[in-house]
């Protein structure tokens, strides 16, 4: 019997690739080359499955070019790189890596928020540039984190983990906005209060964005929302590029209409809006919120588990569109 062929589109832990080789003919990308869309299309030829990252785009035309594809295992919790309805319509299973990255990503979001509030990156750049000549009472004074109001946009697993850190560790009142209000048993231990979106931007001292990207939330933080924020407030984005209008944010930071921002994700990354590189009051990191050794390993392992299960007739642990697993009636 011929073994299914799978593509591992990016470099990943070698032992995870070895594990896949026990089940499949594996083509992989150990040098982590950046493939064009055409190259990805070419490499997917004849494959039954693929292990992808959030950087590989999968659309309906690509799926139509590869009718043998059965499963796309994304090594990320977000899956806006994949046209899921198009996959579902063609019976292609999509899987992601939720849960295993929740706490690590929340740690990083909290660290970014603290870095923005307390001006850690900005003051470090100052020191490295040899500009520190004396102590001064108002040198790099920022905003407190403890006791300040934490505003979370997107109160899913990671949002709740950020809220736990704020409420239980730093005594922060938590307000949040989500499509739906959370049940009392989730809200109460955190003292979390649902507010409408404008109230969130108006009242929070530190806003953290943790909502999944979809076209409906494109630029959900733009000129108008930034104008609602306090001049002392900070904005942290650990969600996805495109949720924030980066050009509007760069202007607001330059004009000190908000105090600071911290961004791990960008519109059009790895390119950045040039204005963000010009302002000192923003912390910039290269999409690494889930990047602890243990968590990246857990994500790769879970993506491989999904791929193996889906192509060997077992139940994939974390399907995004489980409806394609329903027994076919034809
Ligand atoms: C990373 O951005 C992820 O979605 O896991």
Image (tube, helix red, strand yellow):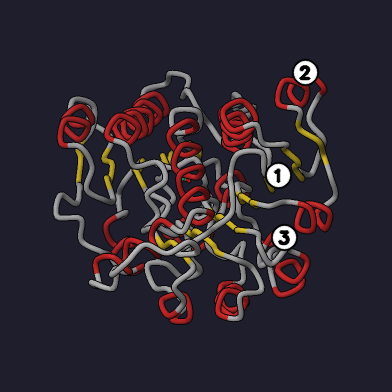
Q: Secondary structure at mark 1?
A: loop
Looking at this view, is 10 or 201 the one in front?
201
The picture quadrant where one finds residue 220 is bottom right
User: How much space separates mark 2 and mark 3, taking CA atoms?
Assistant: 29 Å
Query: Looking at the picture, how far across and down is residue 170, in whole percent?
Result: 59, 33
Q: Is residue 249 left or right of residue 231?
A: left
Image: 152 above or below 280: above
Image: 269 above or below 238: below
User: How much space separates mark 1 and mark 2, taking CA atoms?
Assistant: 21 Å
Q: Secondary structure at mark 2?
A: helix
Residue to which mark 2 is pinned: 185
Q: Earlier in the sequence, mark 2 or mark 3?
A: 2
Image: 271 above or below 300: below
Q: Earlier in the sequence, mark 3 or mark 1?
A: 1
Residue to which mark 3 is pinned: 216
What label does residue 149 carry, if any? 1
Q: Say which residue appears at 75% left-offset and 57% top-offset.
A: 201
């Amino acid at each position: 019997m011929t073994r299914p062929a799978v593509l591992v589109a990016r470099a990943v832990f070698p032992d995870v690739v070895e594990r896949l080789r026990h089940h499949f003919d594996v083509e992989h990308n150990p040098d982590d080359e950046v493939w064009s869309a055409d190259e990805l299309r070419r490499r997917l030829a004849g494959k039954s499955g693929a292990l992808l990252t959030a950087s590989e785009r999968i659309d309906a035309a690509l799926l139509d070019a590869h009718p043998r594809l059965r499963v796309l295992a994304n090594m990320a919790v977000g899956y806006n790189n994949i046209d899921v309805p198009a996959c579902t319509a063609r019976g292609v299973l999509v899987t992601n890596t939720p849960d295993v990255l929740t706490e690590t990503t929340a740690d990083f979001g909290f660290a970014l928020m603290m870095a923005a509030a307390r001006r850690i990156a900005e003051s470090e750049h100052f020191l490295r540039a040899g500009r520190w000549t004396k102590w001064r009472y108002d040198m790099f004074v920022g905003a407190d984190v403890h006791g300040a109001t934490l505003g979370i946009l997107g109160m899913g697993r990671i949002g709740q983990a950020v809220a736990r850190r704020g409420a239980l560790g730093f005594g922060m009142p938590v307000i949040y906005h989500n499509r739906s209000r959370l049940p009392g048993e989730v809200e109460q231990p955190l003292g979390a209060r649902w507010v409408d979106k404008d109230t969130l931007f108006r009242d929070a001292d530190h806003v953290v964005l943790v909502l999944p990207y979809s076209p409906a939330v494109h630029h959900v933080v733009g000129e108008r929302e930034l104008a609602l924020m306090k001049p002392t407030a900070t904005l942290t984005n650990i969600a996805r590029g495109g949720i924030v209008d980066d050009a509007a944010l760069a202007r607001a930071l330059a004009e000190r209409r908000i105090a600071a921002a911290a961004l791990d994700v960008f519109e059009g990354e790895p390119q950045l809006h040039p204005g963000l590189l010009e302002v000192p009051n923003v912390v910039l990191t290269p999409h690494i919120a889930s990047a602890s050794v243990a968590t990246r390993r857990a994500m790769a392992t879970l993506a491989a588990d999904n791929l193996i299960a889906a192509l060997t007739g077992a139940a994939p642990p974390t399907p995004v569109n489980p409806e394609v697993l329903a027994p076919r009636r034809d």
